[in-house]
Image: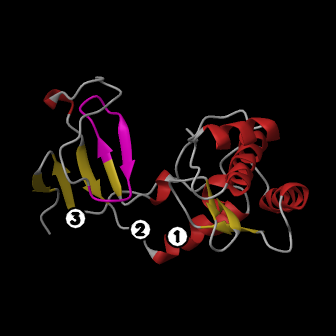
Amino acid sequence: MADLNRVRRWANALIALYLDPAVWTFDFDNAKTRAGLCNYSAERITVSRYLAARYEDDEIHQILLHEVAHALAGSRVGHGPRWRAIALELGYEGDRLHGGAIADDLAPWVGTCPNGHTHYRYRKPARALACGACSRRFDAANLISWAHREVSTAQRRVAAAAASEGRTVGPLTPSPATAVRGRSLVTQYSG
């Protein structure tokens, strides 16, 4: 687990080395499904405090290199050949997207397939989803049942505090409100 103060020092060192520190800044953000962001208009590189607390130092360093490469390549380049060349020159070893975990302890939608695989979403699933771990193709036998859980402001604060201390929070429980299977809405509990 990465120490957030150390991550800030690394980011500022990379900005000083490759970018103009009088122009570019670093900060943490509250993202839960993406690791880093290069904001060209604000000239700021950000990293998710929730995810930084979960990842190892090497992973965070790679995320920082990824975002610095974006800043150097420019806003219209995306993950194309120019960005890739700059990223490799900086020492970036990853792919265009980070495959690490998301902050699933704060996801309001929790899904379970018939075989017990758990899935997390931050938005209500709009269509029927089948478990990719059970079958590479859509299979109605592997439909995911979704349950909504309330994530209170207090729980978000606890998760943010835990992230700043470099620890994770245990899983939240689904609220006794509703579950979604396929497209049909099913009440879990009568209240």
Name the residue located 81 percent from the left edge and 58 percent from the top edge: 11
Identified by mark 1, the residue type is Arg
Answer with left or right where residue 148 lies relative to residue 7. Answer: left
Residue furthest left in the image: 184
Mark positioned earlier in the residue sequence (3 or 1): 1
Residue 177: percent from left, percent from top: 22, 64
Q: Quadrant of residue 133?
A: top left
- Disc 1, disc 2: CB below 8 Å? yes
Mark positioned earlier in the residue sequence (3 or 2): 2
Mark positioned earlier in the residue sequence (1 or 2): 2
Magenta segment:
111-124
SS under mark 2? loop
Answer with left or right where residue 17 lies relative to residue 99. Answer: right
SS under mark 1? helix
Name the residue located 69 percent from the left edge and 53 percent from the top edge: 67
Q: Nearer the viewer, mark 3 or mark 1?
A: 1
- Which residue is identified by label 3? 177
